[in-house]
Image (cartoon, grey):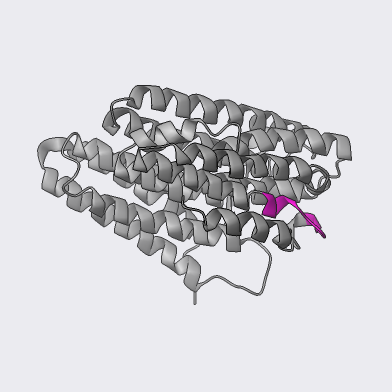
Amino acid sequence: MVFPAGILTDAIWAPILGGFLVLAVGGRNGRLVRWLALAVSLLTFGLTLPLLAGFDTHTAAMQFVERIPWIPSLNIHYHLGIDGISLWFILLTSFLTVLVVIASWTSVQKRVAQYLAAFLIMDGLMIGVFCALDAILFYVFWEAMLIPMFLIIGVWGGERRVYATIKFFLYTFLGSVLMLVALLYLYFHSGHSFSLLAYQDTPLGLGPQIWIFLAFLMAFAVKIPMWPVHTWLPDAHVEAPTGGSVILAAVMLKMGAYGFLRLSLPITPDASHHLAWLVILLSLVAIVYIALVAIVQQDMKKTHCLLLDRAHGICDPRPVRLHGYGHGGKHYPDAFPWLYQRCHVPVRGSPL
């Protein structure tokens, strides 16, 4: 079966351009805006389905690759591609956007066009994160997707939406600055390349790997979020409208784990193994501490948010605690099942 060469580009830019089209139509016809947004979201989901149909499960190489020079003087490329991890995140993102549009059909009455456009634009930007194979392109998508969510919480959120929005933006933005520093370091030590695949083949000593891993850890720990940089999540989750909470919990928080799998493990495998104890320690503290905090909550949405964060703490150690690990992401066996079972079962069975 033959698929268009630019299918990833179509999946990224169709919802972004569709979002601007929804903005152009504006509030002149609320019914038209809703149907247009639904059509764009369905089109985007339809564009991602051929990725599943045409995906080759017999190769570890990136598929549906697109590579075009973007800023040749700095060796920056518009470089896209997916593997088995990216594939399911892309399908999840596009599918949930359809549900969010449908769910807001009657519940959102204020600035409908702007609300739906924000979700469509964010849909394309999040898909871009899962497709990007150039470090600068990855960083641009990573940061740009914060803007629509910033607006969604700040405009359509609850009473404390301004506080929650500023806290959300500052935590996530400042954490990402360290990731940019690490990417620039890798650029100068990989023959002036911004290719994430080239970084996997760049020989690095344990010392540099540790510093790079810690920089990535700060960026991805905030996004997951891990204790103690998790405090932005309850405010953002509670104050966000329903659609914002759905995308935040189902996609955005998972990008932290995706970052560990896409950048930390293949680029700094030795440091990931060496500092596994740190991630495990933070995760164990989160499991106990956040469960105790959840007990005293009287807001159901905040309780759900805290338990969601606690669940992330259960899963956090699994990608980094490697008994055997391979270069380039080829072999990462599931690890630490003993600790996982003993931490997961008591909390899961608790009255929370």
**Residue 187 counted in the magenta span:** no
User: Image point 58% across, 38% down: which residue?
Assistant: 289
Residue 90 image point, x, y percent: 48, 56
Q: Is residue 46 above or below residue 252?
A: below
Residue 51 image point, x, y percent: 49, 66
Q: Is residue 63 above or below residue 54?
A: above
Q: Is residue 73 visible?
A: no
Residue 129 image point, x, y percent: 53, 46
Side of 85 where 253 appears, left or right: left
Q: Is residue 123 above or below residue 158?
A: below
For the view shown, which residue lies furthest in the bottom direction?
1
Magenta stretch: give its range: 317-327
User: Image point 87% across, 35% down: which residue?
Assistant: 207
- The image quadrant that residue 119 belongs to is top left
Q: How many marks?
A: 0
Residue 79 image point, x, y percent: 59, 48
Looking at the picture, tell me which residue is in the foreground, 118 or 246: 246
For the view shown, which residue lies furthest in the right direction?
205
User: Image point 73% across, 57% down: which residue?
Assistant: 329
User: Image point 10% across, 42% down: which residue?
Assistant: 29
Side of 293 where 235 appears, left or right: left
**Residue 321 counted in the magenta span:** yes
Q: Is residue 308 above or below residue 180?
A: below
Q: Is residue 294 visible?
A: yes
Looking at the picture, tell me which residue is in the foreground, 105 or 94: 105
